[in-house]
Image (spheres, grey):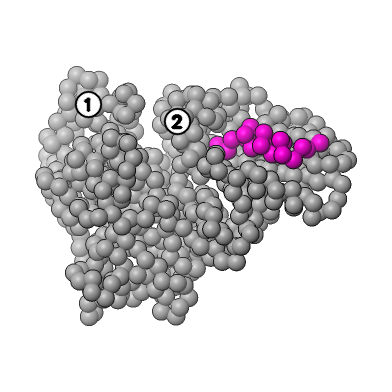
Amino acid sequence: MRESTYDKFPSVSVPRSQGACFAGWDLCVARLRRAIKERATQRTVLVVECYPGAQEEEILRELAARLSPSLIASACKAMIPPPQADALVAPFLGGEDPVFGFRCDLTLDQFFDGGQLARWRTEVESARDGLILVIGCGARLIARGDILVYADMPRWEGQNRFRRSEVSNLAADNKGAPSHLQYKRAFFVDWPVADRWKRTMMAEWDFVFDTTSQASPKLAEGEAVRRGLDRAVTRPFRLAPFFDPAPWGGQWMRQVCGLNGEAPNYGWCFDCVPEENSLLLELDGATLEIPSLNLVFWRAKDLLGRETCARFGGEFPIRFDFLDTIGGGNLSFQVHPLAEYIRRHFGMAYTQDESYYVLDAGENASIYLGLREGIDREAMTRDLLEARSGKMEFPAEKYANRFPAKKHDHFLIPAGTAHCSGANSMVLEISATPYIFTFKLWDWGRLGLDGRPRPIHLDHGLANIQWDRTTSWVKKQLVNRIEPLAGGPGWAEERTGLHETEFIETRRHWFTGPVAHHTQDNVNVLNLVEGREVLVESPDGAFDTFAVHYAETFIVPAAVGPYTIRPGHSRAGGQFGTIKAFARPEKTGAK
């Protein structure tokens, strides 16, 4: 394996940001104190609106100690009691199911007691002099305020706080509850509710609080943050990846991505999942971490393109992530829901169609995909049930095709197709974004990293398996459907998928010299699948040259238009390769 050139902390540099970001509690509060003084009034209402997962108690403690407010109004005191909130969200949590619920349509005001909200509004309005501090998730329901600070929280850090038993869910008292149940509640309730609320006030942020690192909070001017989001949609950029171990995890990413942690393996990397990843903004030498989904909320048309934006709204529909089983084990044998099923059962607008692009492969690498010809459907169902009960090992190869996998193979996996990556495969997963909707059929009899069996969802899985996707159909439709499209001196373009039932199109380019691309008003997501480094450039100098290293995923916003990709060194030698994904026009995509 090669020496790591993978950048784990990519950022977007924000111009004209001198003096726009402050690190540490003392400097953060000094900037707020200056903003209060600049108002030159005897009464100031400072509203600190918080995203779920932010440590409201800590933020309040630090601000109160340094600002000495004359009145403190904590939004949590106006919320409905936790048992009432639990009852409110219960219909969306799927009962005893440990993973799946139904995406809620609740709004933040439903988590508040009308009487308490009115009381606190009156108390704030009645306060005559000094600093009035209103803080918490829903603080702006109490007062619009004179100064608005938004304490944001990337979802990955929020998940880690669940794991560390540091925070409760929205309006709940469940700190220390099993983290997977807190995550489920956040996914189906907290985050949709908070995102709807966040979008109403982004244009009015005076400051943005980054408390991702609790030891080193940062406060940035709201105008500078918006300018950073505006800049991001004019050029290629990357999101900040995160890595996680898995029961089946491997060792490839440890070296290629330069991971030195103590985890026994690294099975996952979310390299481009805007719902989960962070966007790093460089402001006057400081790095501000915010959820990358903010970019979708703020500049959706420029990022996604007009048609993709109209189709997917406030969501980024394409996901690139890594699944590393080199030196590890098989993924769970699984299936994803059909489009109608995911809408009806989980409230999601589209489903998790996907594909496996093989970045690397070890000895006997393989992909399980589709079913074998002539299998007995009832026998397979019976064996899956017996395996779930622990009475037998499920004989996967008796029922499923197992295809040998080599570097640069591409396996297409439309929803409803039984599949999994086998051991010794390094997969770049290119898929639609609803990323938790995996119905495990069989998990090889192993335990999760927490020492407990991982959930098996046979009822959902058996309801979605497409039993007619058998060997001959799979070979023809889903394995290496490579179609040459165009070429020129030093380059060639191929279509590699995805299947006609999936809305994502993928194109692979092989090249030894510059290649011209155009977004066609459609967001492009790319990964450098071969070669050490390439340079992404604007033919008219609209953005600075952007360097991309092996295995890095990058986004080219729809608004960019034309761009070129060329080898990074004049004497680099060898062949380079990129894989590019974009949403097909709806008339030819999945319905």
- Of the residues shown, which amino acid type is indicated by label 1? Gly
Question: Disc 1 designates what residue?
Answer: 445
Specify the segment rendered in magenta: 52-70
In this picture, residue 199 sits left or right of residue 544: right
Above or below, 182 against 420 in this view is above
Q: Single out the mark in the foreground, 2 or 1.
A: 2
The residue lying toward the viewer, choosing from 573 and 481, is 573
Q: Are there few (<14), some (14-19), or many (20+) residues within 10 Å of tag 2? A: some
Residue 408 x %, y %:
20, 57
Q: Is residue 395 visible?
A: yes
Per the image, is 60 magenta? yes
Q: Callout 2: helix, strand or loop? A: helix
Q: Residue at x 25, y 36 (%)?
A: 248
Above or below, 160 against 570 in this view is above
Q: Residue at x 47, y 50 (%)?
A: 278
User: What main secondary structure does the magenta stretch of the protein show?
Assistant: helix
Find residue 76 and name its label.
none
Above or below, 84 against 441 in this view is above
Question: Disc 2 designates what residue?
Answer: 163
Q: Residue at x 69, y 39 (%)?
A: 63
The residue lying toward the viewer, choosing from 356 and 310, is 356
The residue lying toward the viewer, choosing from 359 and 32, is 32
